[in-house]
Image: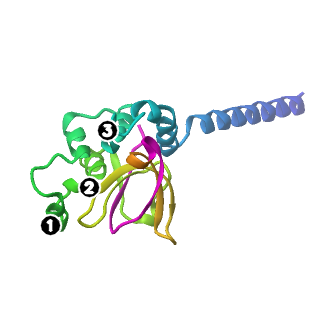
Amino acid sequence: MDLLFSRLNILFFTFLFFTFSLFSQNDSISRNQEVINTMEKYGPSISPTYDTAVCTELVIGILEHLCVLDSMDKNNIRIIVTEDVYQLIENGAPQPKGVYYALTKSNKGIAIDDHKDALPGDFVQFWYPNSWGHCGVLHSIDLVNKTMKLYSSFPSTEGYGIQEFDIPDYCFFVRLKER
């Protein structure tokens, strides 16, 4: 009887362990995967054309499915400034960092300051020297060739799409914190 009871206990605890493991795996979809899933589900409807929603509006639309943004967060993502953005960059101001600045300032994001630590699902803001800037969600990164593919809204994709970009020196990644 003791042997039977012992075996039943082992079976019961094995069952509990595997059941807990399965639930844990299902519940622990990474936050970055949640960002990607949200982008793939809602991106096309948020930005069906570039004129409907530029890159910042797509990022805001995705983030609103994942966390609460206040008006300051949205303004920081949109980089609402009165000064010349390239002068701000040159002076080391945080505002041109857009989504990076918004999420780190509001404690909703974790700064990814080393590009080698960037992962698919991280948000990114970048600027080419005295040219133009862009933001989106990292799809993939190639550090050897200094390129990245982003989910974003861009003229060449006519709105939502995946576009490849060279990684400029002024490029900032931020990871959305767990809920």
Q: Which residue carries the number 3 mark?
A: 57
Mark 1: which amino acid? Asn
- Percent x, y of residue 112: 38, 58
Vertical comparison of 88 with 6: above or below: below
Give left or right: position of 25 versus 150.
right
* Residue 52 showing in the rendered view: yes
User: Marks 2 and 3, how far apart in space?
Assistant: 15 Å
Mark 1 Cα-neighbour bin, 10 Å: few <14, some 14–19, many ≥20: few
Q: Which residue carries the number 2 mark?
A: 97
**Answer yes or no: do the residues labelled 2 and 1 have beta carbons within 8 Å?**
no
Q: Write the start and end of the magenta stretch as one range.
A: 157-179
Q: Which of 35 and 140 is in front in this view?
A: 140
- Percent x, y of residue 58: 36, 39
Give left or right: position of 38 versus 168.
right
Is tag 2's residue or tag 1's residue first in the polypeptide sequence? 1
Q: Which residue carries the number 1 mark?
A: 91
Q: Which of marks 2 and 3 is in front?
A: 3
Q: Nearer the viewer, mark 3 or mark 1?
A: 3
